[in-house]
Image (cartoon, helix red, strand yellow):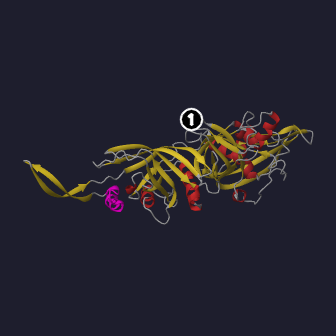
Amino acid sequence: VSSAAAFRAATAPLLRGEASEWVVRGEATVQVLGRSVRVRLRKRLRMPATRMEEMRATDVSIERGDNATGVLTVASRVSFFSRSSLELVQMGALRVHAYYDAGANDPAVPAAERRARAGRLSSSSVRVGTVLLPNYELRAGYNELEEQIHFDQSLGVEAQEAIGHFFGRWLSGYEQTLLCVGPVGNEAAFLDNISVTTTEVLGVPTPLFTGGLMAEEHTVRGWDVTTGASCDTFQQQTGRCVKGAVVYGKAPGRRSLLFRDLVYDAFFDAPFEYSATMRVHAGPLPIKFASFACRPSDKFARLRSVPGMWAFAPGHNHSYSPDPAVAQRQRLADSTVVLEGRPTEGAFFLAAEPQPGQANETDPSGRTGPCVLGLKDVDPFDCCFTTRFTAAACYYQARGEDSIPITASGNATLVVDDWELPAANFGATIARVPIGFTSALTDFRVGINGGPLGRQFFLEFTCEDIAFPPA
């Protein structure tokens, strides 16, 4: 190639899927019957398009992170189809710049519109890194190659936010479009910046969170974050006692991932309302303590990672001290979640609390807590939130279901080696999570024998104490 600029201009239409006409000119000497004849050549040559169609990245897996460079490396397999008879072989490593349009890739945007908007370079396209094809070739027909995507946070604030949106949606299972512009820094420099292509990146095949469980020890009694034991009936205050659900999940690739600062708002499929009665036993006889109504709401709870979340798992060890006493303190202070690579599924606890404004939305009387005798040490929450888990279990049990379908939306800080994607930049991940429940939820009873009064004291309510309006 004598002119890189001319070659790029001539080749660009081919890689955009447009057939082109090239002119071949030159001179040659032909031997005829012992005589040399000088011949001038001029030939119009129809060059077939070599556009890579239906490019899809599958088997996407996070490989490694490097805080020093700001780069997170993701491996995948990219497949595409070429209808041309023209082939490019032994091209060596091919690099292209990767661009991402967060608005065009919004899950609410229809797929056809997403591909059209995200497939063109515009003012909303943000460069997020580089795609590397180590051994690039283009053959006629079906092609499949190994590729690496290097997401680069050092490209600036806009890149960090775009990378966060990409990973949040990828972990939610959404298909997205990356725009690839290049090649850049190619071994054959005359090929640089002649092509703009799109790659459809498939979301994770299974969600980050696969299920959950509400049981007596986790949801009714709760865990004391200072001792790791079950909460005392008269020490239920926030910051001392955590109640919630055990959640199951697994990393979407071959390696483990660490998460912290998890905050997820969980919602029911549809709003529901109910009225309930709570009873307090202070001695041998039950006392009708309170009757109240809870307005329609689809809010379930806010689930978050907190210190004390590993109280439920005495054997949990995340590189803790060999000294048992020190290890227990470290375990109770730990608020990180490590999910192993597939197919290993892990379990972790998330504390439950009302979502902002939930108490005002559900309680028509304006009572936002505490529910039991106004004592935060006995129950720090309002009556609708205190009864919400049991009401939900009863509601779905009456419909013949043994789990509660929940949609959880939130974010977390993702840590890969020493590379971090802060929760503030992490786009919301959305997961459908079935939450199972035990009979301790439909027959709620918590209290003690003894206590300050020296006699039996407990709070109870069951499905018989909860009424739902007719369907």
Q: Is residue 11 above or below residue 462?
A: below
Tell me the quarter of the picture where residue 399 sits. top right
Task: Give the residues drawn in magenta, as a range.
Answer: 1-17
| 74 or 398, nearer to the observer | 74
Residue under the point 80% across and 53% down: 370
Location of residue 9 in the rendering, given as x and y in whole percent from the top left corner: 33, 62
Res 313 seen here: yes
Q: Position of residue 176 (x, y in %)?
A: 48, 53
Q: Quadrant of the N terminus?
A: bottom left
Residue 228 appears anywhere in the view:
no
Query: Under tag 1, what secondary structure?
Result: loop
Is the magenta region chiefly helix, strand or loop?
helix
Q: Residues within 10 Å of mark 1 (few under 14, many from 20)?
A: few
Residue 37: image location, x then y, percent: 11, 54
The residue that appears at 59% across and 61% down in the rendered structure is 157
Above or below residue 453? Residue 26 is: below
Residue 404 in the image: above or below residue 120: above
Identify residue type, mark 1. Answer: Pro
Q: Nearer the viewer, residue 459 or 14?
A: 14
Q: Nearer the viewer, residue 108 or 442?
A: 108
Taking depth in this image into account, of 237 and 403 the one nearest to the observer is: 237
Q: Is residue 6 magenta?
A: yes
Q: Is residue 80 left or right of residue 357?
A: left
Question: Is 19 part of what is drawn in magenta?
Answer: no
Q: Is residue 356 rendered to the left or right of residue 9?
A: right
Q: Quadrant of residue 453?
A: top right
Q: Which residue is mark 1?
A: 343
